[in-house]
Amino acid sequence: MNESVPVFRAVDHGAAKLMPDIDRERAWLLTVDGAPQSYVDLDAPEHLEFEYTRRLGHVLDVVAESGRPLDVLHLGGGGLTLPRYVAATRPGSRQDVVEADRGLLELVAEHLPLPEGADVTVHPADARAWLEAAPDDSADVLVADVFGGSRVPAHLTSVAYAREAVRVLRDAGVYLANLPDAAPFAFLRSQLATLGTVFAELALIAEPGVLRGRRFGNAVLVASHHPVDTAALARRTAADAFPARVEHGPGLREFIGGARPVRDEDAVPSPEPPDGTFGIG
């Protein structure tokens, strides 16, 4: 049983709370202003608790042969759950994490230290500004999981931003994004259209109830120049404790419909979640 006590801290962008999981000895839930941000098990970095992080993890598992080290750029840090996962499942990987909230990074470094030997460099900076200064062809995977409060910031939704992501990724690289929305999916469809202007291949992973318009939820967008193994991805996501569906090809093109790519001057944040969607405690 985890007998640690909760930690409260005012960080740059809200009130952070670290709450111990009573069922796992050294596991913690990180929230900011009541919204869950990350779940970290210090003894089991390969454990992914949240549904969307499990789906991101499934993609990370299939983008290259098992165990092969990757250069990964994470936009959005939180509790550094995915960098820990990559370090555990792909030893030798080099990772950069860009997180605008310096106070949050300090809290995580103090209470949720990274495993010894994890090659993870943390950068307190705005995600797009850092991306625009990053070198060409420097990442195998780019994971975008950036939220201002409970919304994806507008400046990370445009074609200009997508072009920077393509520039930083290697030719065989893969772009992943965690995007929240609900029917009629104006935001999600516009993001697929936007990424489709710079990537040849798109896939979307989401819980069937979300795709059917029954509730607000997270979807994982996958974009690349070369096909991702969607069959392997579909097997993993269907067998997960939280089953999800993989949409790609004609079905995804039909979902995108007439959605238009987003220009910087037209960009808006992701929609505000309904009250109680993600908040706890």
Image (tube, rainbow, N blue to C red):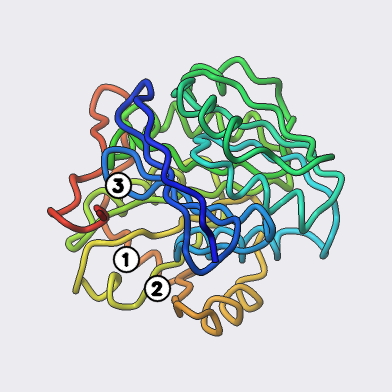
Identify the residue at image location x=17%, y=57%: 276
Residue type at tag 3 = Ala
Q: Are marks 1 and 2 in contact (CB under 8 Å)?
A: yes
At numbered mark 1, what does the secondary structure look like: helix, strand or loop? Answer: helix
Q: Earlier in the sequence, mark 3 or mark 2?
A: 3
Distance CA(mark 1)–CA(mark 2):
6 Å
**Residue 133 percent location from the top left of the image:** 60, 15
Residue annotated with mark 1: 255
Identify the residue at image location x=58%, y=42%: 80
Q: Are marks 3 and 2 in contact (CB under 8 Å)?
A: no
Distance CA(mark 3)–CA(mark 1):
29 Å
Quadrant in the rendering for residue 152: top left
**Residue 17 percent location from the top left of the image:** 37, 40
Identify the residue at image location x=28%, y=77%: 209
Left or right side of 276 for 191: right
Q: Earlier in the sequence, mark 3 or mark 1?
A: 3
**Residue 172 percent location from the top left of the image:** 73, 48
Quadrant containing the C terminus in the rendered view: bottom left
Q: 10 Å neighbourhood of mark 1: few (<14), some, or many (≥20)?
A: some
Left or right side of 189 for 52: right
Q: Depth check: 98 or 193 in front?
A: 98
Identify the residue at image location x=64%, y=36%: 73
Quadrant containing the N terminus in the rendered view: bottom right
Residue type at tag 2 = Gly
Q: Say if 276 sits above or below 233 in the image.
A: above
Residue annotated with mark 3: 35
Residue annotated with mark 2: 251
At numbered mark 2, what does the secondary structure look like: helix, strand or loop? Answer: helix
Quadrant in the rendering for residue 120: top right
